[in-house]
Image (spheres, grey):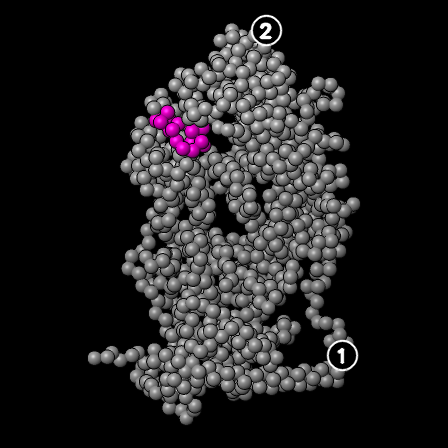
Amino acid sequence: MTFEFTAEQVLELAPDSAAAKAGRDLSTAAKWKNLGKSGDSNSIWGHCQGSGSSPYQTRADLSGPAFKCSCPSRKFPCKHSLALILLYISQGSLFSESEIPSWVAEWLATRAITGTRQKRKDDVDKTSEQLEELLQSKDKRKRDRLSKVQAGIEELELFVIDLMRQGIGSVKKQPFTFWKNRAARLVDAQAPGLARLISECGEICARTHDWENALIDKLSTINLICRTFLKIDQLSPELKADVLTAIGINQSQDELLSGAGESVQDLWLVVGQYNYTQDRLRVQKSWLWGKKGQSALVLSFAHGNAPFDVMLIAGIFYHAELVFYQGSLRQRALIKTKNSEPAVAPFLEGSSVDRALTSYAEALAKTPWLDTMPMLLQEVIPHKSSDGKWWLIDDNKSALPLIAREEIGWQLTSYSGGQPLSLFGEWDGTTLKPLSALKDGSYLKLQTVEV
Amino acid sequence: MRQAKNPFHELIETAILGTDRKPLNVILSGGDLGNTIADIGRQELPSERLLIDQLTAISIAKKAGLIPGSFTCAPPVCPAEIKAKVSERSLSLLIQVLTLEAKGSELKHFKIISEWLELCNTAQQRLPEEFVPRLLDWGRTLTEMHQLIGICCGQHFDWLLSLNEEWRAAYISKQNIDKENLIETFETGEQKERLMAFSAIRNTWPDEGLSLLALSFEKESFENKVAFLKILSKTLHSNDEGFLESTLKDRRKEVRAQAANALSALPNSKLQMRMIERADRFLTYKQNKIIVTLPEELDDEMLRDGIVENSPIYFDSRLGTKANWLCQILSLVPPSHFEQKFNLSAKALLEAALANSEWSLALSLALMAAAAKFGGAMQQALLQSEDLNITDSQAGLLLLKALPQATLENLILQKLPTWSQARTISKAAPRLDLWYYLEQVDFNWSEHFTGEIMKFIIKESREKVPVFGHTFYSNASNFALRMHIVAGELTDQINVDADTADIYRRNALERMTDTVKLRYEIFQSFNTVNHNEQKGPMP
């Protein structure tokens, strides 16, 4: 049985710092009984005495990792689950290879069934007429939505035209509700993607400097999406998918998983990851980089303290089959199957600064409203210039500006020691947000705070 | 001649001002982007539509055509590291301490991190380079830790300092100091820097330190005067007497009291002589009893010598103001003076003092303060006396604080059985007293002492009515920081059962065990790596 997570990586799964601390405190042998493991199923388990009369049954599937505990905590993973894995990391010898108890076997069986579930039962039971009817009503709903979106976009175009007439200088002092109300109208028009872009305009206006160019860029993006949508019937299927995604019309995950999306099997490294909150929803953005050079974006969502729907750990390799969303650029993907892969880290090939910029220009040619693009830069050295700005310099002495807090800049500098390293980040057309660095087979996650 | 504006800037200006105020009249051509914009401009559309389309073209072109920056020289390279990195476990524990910062726990972090660094240094290991900046930021103002931080950061320490001006200022200037720099800091620095500079000058060049202080003393605030005198008191020399005598003329009583305190510690100083002369007027010995005559007034001479109206050290509702003056005077006279004068042993002198039922309290307080200051046989006499409760007064706590750590530990261990069996021994010490005594034992408790105290705590944690009180609750974390690391092996035996312990006791015991465990885990994390076969020495 192999398991290569570090304690820090496991603690990143904790829903909050209190759970992390409690998990650490519980990760001592004295608190646990009947510890066991099964190499075949890659699972561990144990009994932890809590405040209840009977001990809690805690089990974990290390290939996910996935957890289950009989405690009443609403946090996930709970402190007992975290403690079990932390104890396994620090004192693995306490876990003896033994027969899987029934309460673990049942859970593993349930997981296996859930994993292999292909099609919902209610779909299977439908007759062909009923299915045809369903399809027609689905098409009608789609048409209705598109006409709503069209109305919303026409109204938005008028708003942008008005802005050009009055000048963007006139909106600088507008309250945030000016943008919020406009965004709300787009939500009503079922175009949440455009609503988000409009909200971002409000955030840009709140800046004290360089807001004009940023606002023009954002309005340009909105203009592009709107103009493209209005010609949707003339677009290629890929560009059509792109523009619908930009507007916020999601592709059906079931359809993608059942064959509509392109599937890629590879060894993937979770090369960059950060969380942020959007409309009271917690979002985890995970960038994966495949051994074959393909990148993929996996988004996970969660409400409150609920766990993310997809559990990925930064710095870990997964043998996984990904299914990409339709579009000109293969970027966002779903995970169809995965196993954690503690194997030797393969060399991930990045690119030079010039090559990365060329790739970005090519991507813009395909999807001009592209928000951010992942970049894995190879053989670059972080450097702080005399004017206090952070740069990444490659061996051709070409440099990209970094947007990073001071502590991240210095952490990166110290990690490199003035020697070249590989750096992964998100490029937004003007600056690179560093998310991780790779050097001599080691991985460093940079703690990014989403602004 | 007016220079033509960049046409792209013209468009942006129009966007900011609006087409109402700045009509769109720029037609560009030339180059791919210029031609594209010109083509857009030729369409028969409203000018606002043309403007946003042209801006969109510029926006995309700007992103797609970004020219990377260029640097001519490469940044310097850090020399190769010689030491191995600390283990994942050691690092994880350090991060745990650095991350879980709570208000009011600075001492805990300081102590545990310094212990971690000591262990790292002993193990000849280093912090992984990616965590060096975080530690440098943490220790920026902790000058006493700088050397250890430097060692544990390996080659990256000097290399990063060469790149970061703020770290350089914080670390290097205080490491490589010379006399001139120190004098300059003393003369022009911030208050904290001035105190540190004076302390450094005084330690290395005591006479220069004294001259510097004498020159600036009059202009200092009274807080600074007191602080500088405290530093001066740590390295007293007979040469200092003249200066200290002059400071007795200061307007502020706090300054005079501090100066008097320093002077009284100088053997045979003029102030000590004056105090002895005064004390002799107030104390006589007759029929195995010390006879007390109280001072009538607080005269100018006494005020000059640092005697204050009411010293808090001798505050007791049973004592009046004049008794307080007497206590202050007697506390500045070595008890050995009275032993010689009355030809009594320390024990007999104490008995004679306590025999005066009217003034026994004042005399015992004064003797405790004097014994704390001057040491000698009176210390043992006081500690062994069964008629005194040392922890009842500030003077008594001063006495405990002044004892060498080994003496205090032995004293507590001697008393421990009486605290443990308080219900069966009739003349036992008050049981809660232990915690007052423990408060006075500073850091680094000995292994044996720690073991005995832990056994006591384990035993008490299982009692129905345990001896833990408020002093234990408020000091639980501190005790855990002071204990020897061996305490970590015993924490599991402490009963913190939710059913039997009240919430205050449980919280205190949990705080204590958590801290001890953390320290023990840190120790083990280094010990496991370095001494796989045999257990390494406890720090």
Q: Residue at x 60, y 46 (%)?
A: A89
Q: Residue at x 34, y 80 (%)?
A: B10
Region rendered in magenta = B243-257
Please state the horizontal and vertical placement of residue A159, each as a whole percent of the image.
50, 83
Residue reaching furthest to the bottom: B44
Q: Nearer the viewer, residue A307 or A198?
A: A198
Residue reaching furthest to the right: A53
Check disc 1 and report the residue beneath it. Answer: A126
Q: Is residue B37 above or below residue A383?
A: below
Residue reaching furthest to the left: B1
Q: Amino acid at mark 1?
A: Lys
Q: Nearer the viewer, mark 2 or mark 1?
A: 2
Q: Amino acid at mark 2?
A: Gln
- Which label belongs to residue B287? 2
- The answer for which chain carries disc 2 is B
Q: Nearer the viewer, residue A98 or A89?
A: A89
Q: Callout 2: few (<14), some (14-19), or many (20+) C-alpha neighbours within 10 Å? A: few
> Can marks 2 and 1 be said to lie on one chain?
no
Horizontal side of residue A170 vs B208, given as left or right: right
Q: Quadrant of residue B392?
A: top right
The answer for how far apart the CA atoms under marks 2 and 1 are is: 116 Å
